[in-house]
Amino acid sequence: MEPVILLCAPNGARKSAADHPALPISPDELADCAESILAAGASIMHVHVRDDDGGHSLDVERYQVALAAIRQRVGDKLVLQATTEACGIYSATEQMRVVRELQPEAVSLALHELCPDETSEEVAGEFFAELNTNNIMAQYILYSPQEVARFVSLKRKGVIPDSPAFVLFVLGRYSDDLTGDPEALTQFVEAIQDEAVWAVCCFGRTEAAAVAKAVAMGGHARVGFENNLLLPDGGPAADNAELVRLAANSSGERSLASADDVRQYFGRR
């Protein structure tokens, strides 16, 4: 059985310490978080940085400082994934520029932001190919089964590189109460048609149930305060590491992937 890849998204673009006192923002806080989630079983850390006012930022220098602080603490024992989230601030051109300047080990890409329609396919395809050439591990973020079907079509057309692809299914982003339905995962998995390795993340207290379902279906999972602050009983999680430990305990007979396992799996080492 394949090891389970556990990703942790500890802060996101919008939440602050007012939402949870253990939400990491500064480079030192992110480094502390990295140590704790690594010990809990994570192999990939999804990293957001903030501006001086705590707002979402894709500033390259801020990223360099944060990633260096994390690397100093955990070395190469975590794959560090930078976000390209637009958050209503950045254009696709700016998102691509950040990645080209930063050259992170891994990056997350919302398909609807970077390749929203047919007119954007040529430019997006060139960017995706560039990532592949530069050994940057891309994860494509998909919010609906319909978007998954479009991803499959783009991969078969060659817009998405024909190499081991990694996608993230997002449950609950457009629900009325920002709580995902784990049962919806089945539609996503059917739509991907084995065209990519997949993980799931889920908004709200149903996160743990979505993780358990994903693991049982042969997939992987992302947890963390970006999408969820709660335990299954509705109480607050102590920190991101508690959510990772909860996910790790759902792995059953599957072992947990290390960062090097992830790199090898996607041909990045």
Image: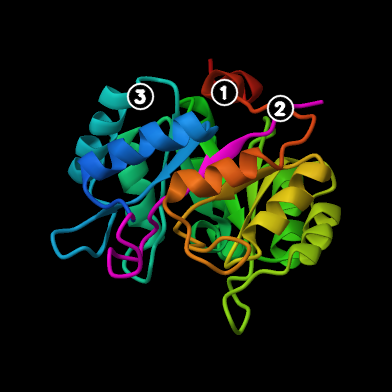
Kindly identify which numbered label has been placed on residue 238. none
For image coordinates 52% across by 24% down, the residue present is: 259
Q: Can residue 57 be seen in this view?
A: yes
For image coordinates 78% across by 66% down, the residue present is: 184
Kindly report the distance in space between the C-alpha atoms of the residues bearing marks 1 and 3: 13 Å
Q: Nearer the viewer, residue 210 or 47?
A: 210
Of the two numbered discs 1 and 2 on the same chain, state the one appearing first in sequence.
2
Kindly identify which numbered label has been placed on residue 3. 2
Mark 1 Cα within 10 Å, few/some/many (few <14, many 20+)? Answer: many
- The kind of residue on which mark 2 rests is Pro
- The kind of residue on which mark 3 rests is Val
Q: What secondary structure prevails in the magenta region?
A: loop
Where is mark 3, residue-wise? 74
Of the two numbered discs 3 and 2 on the same chain, state the one appearing first in sequence.
2
User: Percent from the top left, x then y, of residue 69?
Assistant: 23, 32
Where is mark 1, residue-wise? 258
Q: Quadrant of residue 166?
A: top right
Question: In this figure, which colouring scheme has been used for the structure?
Answer: rainbow
Q: In which quarter of the image is residue 155?
A: top right
Q: What stretch is highlighted in magenta?
A: 1-22
Q: Are marks 1 and 2 in contact (CB under 8 Å)?
A: yes
Q: Nearer the viewer, residue 5 or 21?
A: 21
